[in-house]
Image (spheres, grey):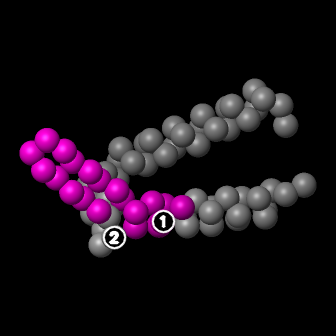
Amino acid sequence: MNIAKTLIIVGLILLFLGVFIYLFKPYLGWFGNLFGDISYKTDKFSLYMPITSMIILSAIASLILNLFFKFFDR
C-alpha cells in the first residue's frame, strides 16, 4: 500500500471519529469522570490523570485493530 492511500484512509478515519464525537458528545459525558480517574486541584495547581478512561479506550482500540487486521490480513 502506498503512502497516499494510507494518508487518505487515516484522514477518513479521523474525520469519522471527529463527526462521531461531535454528534454524540452529550452521550459521552461519563467518559473522563470514571472511578479510577484521578483529579487533584489546589489554588495554583491542578492535576488530572484519566487512568481508567485510557484503559477502556486502549482496550476498545486494541479490539478494533485486532478485528481489522484479522479480516484484512493478506
Q: Residues within 10 Å of mark 2 (few under 14, many from 20)?
A: few
> In the rendered view, would you say 24 is above or below 15?
below
The residue lying toward the viewer, choosing from 62 and 67, is 62
Question: Do we see residue 27 in this rendering?
Answer: no
Q: Residues within 10 Å of mark 1 (few under 14, many from 20)?
A: few
Residue 20, image x, y percentages: 43, 48
The residue lying toward the viewer, choosing from 23 and 37, is 37
Magenta-colored stretch includes residue 48: yes
Residue 28 horizontal side relative to residue 66, left or right: left
Looking at the rendered image, the quarter that the C terminus falls into is bottom right
The kind of residue tagged 1 is Ile
Task: Provide the secondary structure element on which disc 2 rests.
Answer: loop
Q: Residue furthest bottom?
A: 35
Q: Which residues are magenta?
A: 38-58
Kindly identify which numbered label has been placed on residue 36.
Answer: 2
Q: Disc 1 vs disc 2: Cβ atoms closer than 8 Å?
A: yes
Kindly identify which numbered label has been placed on residue 55.
Answer: 1
Q: Residue furthest top?
A: 4
The kind of residue tagged 2 is Gly
Task: Provide the secondary structure element on which disc 1 rests.
Answer: helix
